[in-house]
Amino acid sequence: MEQKATYIKEKFTEILGFAPDDTQTDQLIKFYEMTVEKNKVMNLTAITEFEEFVMKHYVDSMSIIKVIDLKDKNYSLIDIGTGAGFPGIPLKIMFPELDITLFDSLQKRLAFLDVVIRELGLKKIVTVHGRAEEFGRKLDYREKYDIVVSRAVAELTPLCELSIPFCKVGGYFIAYKGMKGDIELKSADRAIKVLGGKLAGTYEFTLPATETDLEKDSTEADTNSGRFLIKISKIKSTDNKYPRGGGKPFKTPLYIEKKANQ
Ligand code: SAM
């Protein structure tokens, strides 16, 4: 426990420039332990080794601070396709003032997150079960969030159609992407505009390798560590025709449709 706490505090300080306090550190360790335990009976994550978990789930989730200041902010934030709770749970632990909605189409992962929320004593955080392309059309969810985040859910163009409708005008959609993020961004250029967004910035970085990475084949480790954050500001309301239903955001991503119409 002591060693784990030291590792977390050191890595956060080294890479992010701030450390969790003792309560937050305990919560991060407990969430790790609960996830690894539940992972024995439910598919939550491929990463179960502690140092790798800290780096690829916690530090990666927190990298959002490079594009937006969340400290002491009571923003409403929705995590689309939160899965096992990333980035939503680490963000809640480190920025307790945020009002967080963990959104996913898989109920059993959310049931696990409800237990996590209860056991960690987290407040101002709820889980919501549904498909983004349906909930993005509902009045209670549409354009209701200051910040929309999403990690590892879909290619950027369909992801924008799923996510930008949740965002208030004046708010931000922040996509956590891997090393192909810049290529996806070029293709999504037109979709972002059509949906009411405007590129507000990007942040590219490499997650430091852990012992586990170094034991793996080096090329595999290399391809796993590149990260690209994309920050989109919502500058105007999304047209009511988006998000489209019937799987269209994926089957006919917006930019392809537009190019075909040119
Ligand atoms: N964000 C987590 C992470 O980075 O570890 C989970 C990523 S997991 C690969 C993708 C998650 O998105 C799954 O839990 C899946 O159920 C959810 N998902 C995929 N499509 C979705 C949709 N249309 N609406 C809501 N959730 C969706």
Image (cartoon, rainbow, N blue to C red):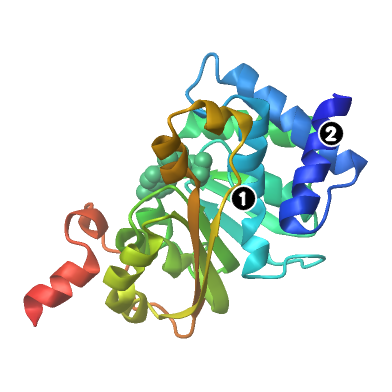
* Amino acid found under the numbered disc labelled 1: Ser
- Residue under label 2: 5
**From where the camera sits, is residue 241 visible?**
no
Left of 50 or right of it: where is 189?
left
Q: Position of residue 208 (x, y in %)?
A: 61, 46
Q: Position of residue 104 (x, y in %)?
A: 48, 43
Q: Residue at x 43, y 30 (%)?
A: 217
Quarter placement of the N terminus: top right
Towards the viewer: 208 or 38:
208
- Residue under label 1: 61
The numbered mark, 1 or 2, whose residue comes first in the sequence reads 2
Does dot 2 land on a helix, a strand or a loop?
helix
Q: Residue at x 21, y 71 (%)?
A: 255
Q: Residue at x 50, y 20 (%)?
A: 42
Q: Position of residue 52 (x, y in %)?
A: 61, 33
* Amino acid found under the numbered disc labelled 2: Ala
Q: Is residue 213 depicted above or below 92 in this figure?
A: above
Q: Position of residue 86 (x, y in %)?
A: 58, 44
Left of 186 or right of it: where is 262?
left
Left of 189 or right of it: where is 65?
right
Mark 1 vs 2: CB contact within 8 A: no
Towards the viewer: 84 or 189:
189
Q: Is residue 172 depicted above or below 6 in this figure?
A: below
